[in-house]
Amino acid sequence: MNVLVTIFTVLIFPLNSSLFFLGDWVQGKEKEADASVFENRKMELKVNRDEKFSLESVLPMTQFQPVRKEKKDDLILSDAHASVILDAGSGTILQYQNGKERRQIASLTKMMTAVLVMERIKDLDEIVTIDENSVYVEGTKIGCPRSGYCISLRMKVGEKISVRNLLKAMLMNSANDAATALGIHIGGDMEKFVEIMNKRAKELGLYDTNFCTPSGLELDGRENECYSSAYDIGRVAVHSLKFDEMWKIFKLPSNTIIKSADEKYEHIILNTDEIVEEVPNFLGGKTGFTPLAGRSLLVAVQNPTKEHTIVCVLLDDPYRWQDIKTMINWTFDSYSWQ
């Protein structure tokens, strides 16, 4: 039996130096964790082994690999339905909890909309004309940081506004009208843009994703068709890190003012990110909420030396702000890059 264990360890462990759980697994210590934790560990191994290399097509791979420090416990987030932590430089999964489970992700969808804006629109000062589909979309809007709560003018039908300002409203304040307007501007109509979103998702190897709208709002009666996973949307975020202009927006302060192209209309934009000034080396983050999706959060953070970046994703976690800090602290306490 000991011979078999040794052979298994030698053959499997080199697959990924960050697969910290294998040492405990072959020693039979998996009984200390419940079955769901062990299943997540096995899935983490499978995803790292089978899919890590597909990340090379979208990530600027580095020579550094995250290595788990000795005697560091696993991170289990009991309030999150799904979570994942990715090392942006190597594509390695550092934490995984139901990471490939298909779930509604609400406004985290806007990460893909933003990626398509950056990939397809060369000049962010390009002008967009606002139509009725954008103005009358449900939920958070420009000027209304929460549904039913407005602090400044909403957009008007026929208003002309830059892509840059719409991007600010979409990423900072999660404005659904801004996301819809950008989608229609790129695709011609919302349905065509959704086709573009899903085609791009397939190109990026997102196997557990199907987008329904540019904003992340679910379609009435078709909610189950709108989904992604913590792992997939985390990969979208990693891919987006190449777009510096996009990530600068995440850190803009609340009460930022955006104007229409003719400066006739002014809109006040709040920042939904509560930890933008609390976490050292914070690059940015995106919030998400619908009653079906629950409260979700995605952030990107650099390590203390600013040499390495991680992306953390939480899906359906009522304590997302506290738990995301736990994820960040646990990662930099548990890993070194070598």
Image: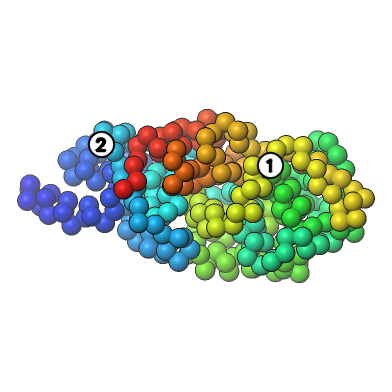
Position of residue 258 measured from the top left corner of the image (x, y, whole percent): 81, 47
Q: Amino acid at mark 2?
A: Glu
Q: Residue at 72% of width from left, 49% of height from top?
A: 168
Q: Is residue 332 left or right of residue 79?
A: left
The tag earlier along the polypeptide, 2 or 1, is 2
Name the residue tied to disc 1: 252
Q: Is residue 334 left or right of residue 195?
A: left
Residue 36's quadrant in the figure? top left
Q: Residue furthest right?
A: 264
Q: How many numbered discs, if any? A: 2
Q: CA distance from mark 2 to mark 1?
A: 39 Å
Q: Secondary structure at mark 2?
A: loop
Crowd rating for badge 2 (residues with CA inside 10 Å; few <14, some 14–19, many 20+): few
* Residues tagged 2 and 1 counted as in contact (Cβ below 8 A): no
Q: Residue at 28% of width from left, 50% of height from top?
A: 17
Residue 262's quadrant in the figure? bottom right
Query: Does residue 74 appear in the picture of this structure?
Result: yes
Position of residue 56 measured from the top left corner of the image (x, y, whole percent): 42, 63
Crowd rating for badge 1 (residues with CA inside 10 Å; few <14, some 14–19, many 20+): some
Position of residue 235 measured from the top left corner of the image (x, y, whole percent): 49, 55
Q: Is residue 319 left or right of residue 186?
A: left
In this rendered view, identify the residue nearer to me: 222 or 246: 246
Query: Does residue 289 appear in the picture of this structure?
Result: no
Position of residue 228 measured from the top left corner of the image (x, y, whole percent): 54, 54
Q: Residue at 74% of width from left, 55% of height from top?
A: 164
Badge nearest the viewer, 2 or 1: 1
In this rendered view, identify the residue nearer to me: 281 or 22: 281
Name the residue tied to disc 2: 70
Q: Secondary structure at mark 1?
A: loop
Q: Residue at 74% of width from left, 48% of height from top?
A: 169
Q: Amino acid at mark 1?
A: Leu
Residue 225's disc is none
